[in-house]
Image (cartoon, rainbow, N blue to C red):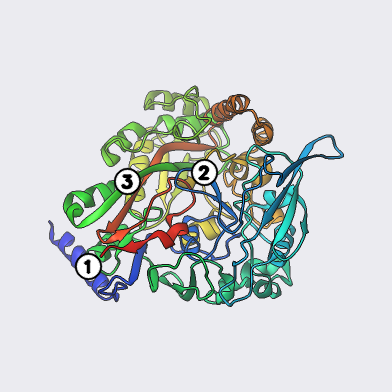
Amino acid sequence: MTDLSRILWSSLMLLAATIPTGRAAEHQSLTIGTIQFPSTLNPNIEAMAAKSYVLGLALRPFTVYDADWKLICLLCTQLPSIENGLAAPVDLPDGKKGIDLTYTIRADASWGDGVPVTTADVLFTYKVGRDPKSAIENAELYRRIIGIDAHDDKTFTMHFDKLTFDYAAINDFIPLSAHIERDAFADPTQYRLRTHYNTDPANPGLYNGPYVLKEVSSGSHILLEPNPHWTGPPPHFRQITVRAIENTAALEANLLSGSVDMIAGEVGLPLDEALAFEKRHGTDYQVIYKPGLAYEHVDINLDRSALADRRVREALILGIDRAAITRSLFAGREPVADSFMNPLDAGYTDAVPHYGYDPARAQALLEEAGFHAAANGGRRNANGQELSFELMTTAGNRSRELVEQVLQSQWRKIGVEVKLKNEPARVLFGETLRHRRFDLAMYAWISSPENVPRSILRSDEIPSEANAFAGQNIAGFNNAEMDRLIDALEVELDRNKRNTLWAEAQRLYATELPSLPLYFRSDAFILPKWLTGLHPTGNQYPTTLWVTDWAASP
């Protein structure tokens, strides 16, 4: 170890030692280390894994996918189906098929201040989601719901304008506490800023899960304690602290010092660092690896003139050796991606364009695109435009930063200059990507099983001032054929026909390359040996949703 390395390691250990431990001797408290801090805690604004992880402890959606990738009820009592009569297909005036879905809220569901969860909350959430100025993330879901009838305080029927293959999944309809949030919505244009999840996040009336938030220190930690009005299975821990340490080396040091008890797999150490950690300290911890539906990629801002040329995008992917990256960094455990759909998922096809490492072909494509070799080793077009981009990712993620450096080096060999500019996750996702202020951005999409990519690939989901920057199609992919395939996928009930549509969508994506596929991620859960009951899901729904199963072994 060099002198510089010793100094750095000593500094990290000193930093860890100054943070009070969250673990009681009897394991009645639990401190969880994560690599990100949420940019907002409002469940319906911005999609961010760190937020989902925290809210999994404190909020219950109506429906989610579990660790077996089965759709289940959490806040509702029974999934509607055509067979049980709670789902009723209907003919709509335009000749299309819709469906009416009836749900019943659990009779014992209450907010953390003792107010029951009722259909008043459902109707208020619908009002917020329907307002185009509210900045709600999945606005398309609320557009599809053409009305809600409340039959009583606990039962309601949603009227949908489409009969989709996953009709019972209302996962993104997460109820808001009407009696708390109503005043914040007085001016919908300001709701994103005035929501009590931002201004008063420790208000217990915002939460209906087994825990409520007691303290929120922005960028640092979130403290949770049991919800006194929770009537489900009692949680084991009297206190849970989720501590954000936005540097993976410091996160590991905090684990070793005992300042955190575990590292969350969903927002924790990348696989390469977890593998190295297990070699050094694996006998002292449980280390669980879970392959799943996390897709690491580089999004491309298609509004940048050079990147709008498909030949440039193809050159970029041909200019990187993705197989070598996953082989050398991840021991081959993270397979190279050729499209957005994971081989573990239904509808996956291998019949798509494959791009191996071919720098000669990459350079030829750049020449065709008009970017010719310059004396400085870079490339310029006839107008003098230099082929130069900024590449961004989440600051402090040592693995991503290493991959960035590899990409930068390999792209330099084909004449593409890349500058690295990283930001904390809460800034990158909360501001920069949301407003599309980037050239290239490396991060992951985490999805549910057979998740139709409407929000990330359909043209009307491009974030803009007109939609309050609520869409997730940050690449700006505007393709009529992809729009058609997405619309067709959602309403195709026949599995074989749907697989055909899935294959077409994957081929189109791999041909047009609105993003550069890198690899499919595995998450590493580093847990204390005394913790039981935690089962990784491998999908976008975090383990924290089942925190009442967690316990300390005797």
Q: Position of residue 156 (x, y in %)?
A: 73, 57
**How far apart are the two marked residues, 1 and 3, measured between alpha carbons?**
23 Å
**Of 526 and 319, which appears nearest the observer?**
526
Q: Quarter of the image for the C terminus: give it.
A: bottom left
Q: Please identify, in this view, whether the residue under mark 3 or under mark 2 is nearer the observer.
A: 2
Q: Quarter of the image for the N terminus: give it.
A: bottom left
Residue beneath disc 3: 289
Residue beneath disc 1: 257
Task: Say which residue appears at 44% left-offset and 68% top-offset.
Answer: 234
| Label of residue 385 in the image | none
* Dot 2: element: loop
* Proximity of marks 1 and 3: CB atoms separated by less than 8 Å: no
* Dot 1: element: helix
Left or right: 547 as drawn, with respect to 461: left
Q: Position of residue 123 (x, y in %)?
A: 73, 62
Crowd tier of the residue under label 3, counting other residues whose Cα lies within 10 Å: few below 14, some 14–19, many 20 or above:
some
Which residue extends farthest right? 93
* Proximity of marks 1 and 2: CB atoms separated by less than 8 Å: no
Q: Quadrant of residue 473?
A: top right
Q: Please identify, in this view, whether the residue under mark 1 or under mark 2 is nearer the observer.
A: 2
Question: Mark 2 belongs to which amino acid?
Answer: Lys
Mark 3 or 2, nearer chain start:
2
| Label of residue 70 in the image | 2
Left or right: 126 as drawn, with respect to 411: right
Q: Can residue 331 be seen here?
A: yes
Q: Position of residue 511 (x, y in %)?
A: 54, 27
Question: Mark 1 belongs to which amino acid?
Answer: Ser
* Dot 3: element: strand
Q: Can residue 424 be seen here?
A: no
Mark 1 or 2, nearer chain start:
2
Compared to residue 295, the image places residue 506 above or below, namely above
* Proximity of marks 3 and 2: CB atoms separated by less than 8 Å: no
